[in-house]
Image (tube, grey):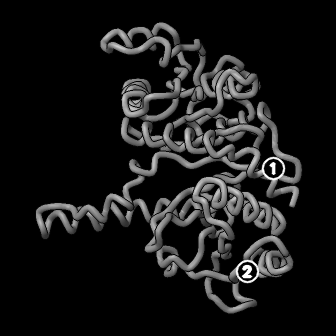
Amino acid sequence: MKIALDLMGGDNAPKELLAGALKWLDENNTGQVILVGKQDMMEAELSGYSYDSQRLMMVNAGQVIEMDESPATALRRKKDASIVVATQLVKEGRADAVVSCGSTGAQMAAAIFILGRMEGVERPPIVAAIPSRGAHPTLLIDVGANVDCRPMQLVQFARLGRAYAKGVLNIENPRVALLNNGEEEGKGNNLTTQTYELLRQQKNINFIGNLEGRDLFNDRSDVIVCDGFTGNILLKAMEGMAIYLAAGVKQELGAIPSAFARLDYTRIGGAPLLGVNGISIVCHGSSRREAVCAGLAIAAECINNNIVAQQLQELQS
């Protein structure tokens, strides 16, 4: 497998991203990483390392899309941007997946306009794994790709999340829940009440009803559906709470229990963008080498489990 890594995206590019790529290669006997970025910068960074040139390659990209740029405008003006070039490698079959810690909006735009949306998908969502008391993590979808959603789009999120749960987590009949402010039918705003009715009508979705925020980690469901505005706030609130609790526990006990590792986003690595004709892994903007390595591992999981085909099959059922 070949994974394209946008070496120019993120707060710690390119040094930590390169270190993460080398870490992943060192921990895996197979697989190749294609570094995409400014050639002179990549060569300068690599000069301090010994590496296998058959497994670590470089593709030049002379431009970078910054976090504060309009994704659509930047995509048109910067044809040689690293995320554009990396995504194009997937489109051309020269890479099997792309991983980036850069602008999420730019990565989404590149995936939509270069890879293309799957038939039946209006808005591709991002799926994130959150810790659970069960044997596997729970999937939260969408976590930031789409802040304003219509009910049918949330149904599409449910189908894509179900495909990921089956294909990557190996759950035969995933339990799908709708994030809401109460368990009772009829609870919520216009979006959730209408989505509830649509999900209940889906014969191929194991819809278990509404789920409240307090049950996120209680192994009540396998896939939790929400709009990207809610999901993104929830995800970042969890990150902040984990940092707060870990600091408090360390101050009191002198050490952080190993259980807190399950709340560490650097161990999770990245979140796949679903509903596009290719594999695109969105990583945290502040990712360091451990998170980059984990993001590459998620890309490898998606490749090995043929997640694109899994989604297409789910959408056609």
Tell me the distance, in whole angstroms, between the alpha carbons under discs 1 and 2. 31 Å
N-terminal-most mark, 1 or 2: 2
Q: Quadrant of the N terminus?
A: top right
Whole-percent x and y of residue 219?
51, 76
Q: Which mark is residue 189?
A: 2
- What label sits on residue 1 in the rendered view? none
Q: Which residue is mark 1?
A: 312
Instruction: Please state if 24 lies on the left or on the right of 88 as rendered.
Output: left
Say whether residue 167 is left or right of residue 240. right
Residue 273 screen position, x and y as percent: 66, 47
Give the residue furthest to the bottom.
184
Q: Is residue 266 left or right of residue 277?
A: left
| On screen, residue 290 above or below 131 | above
Residue 224 sits in quarter = bottom right
Say whether marks 1 and 2 touch (CB < 8 Å).
no
Q: What secondary structure is marked by label 1?
A: helix
Residue in the picture at 52% in, 15% down: 57
Quadrant for the C terminus, please: bottom right
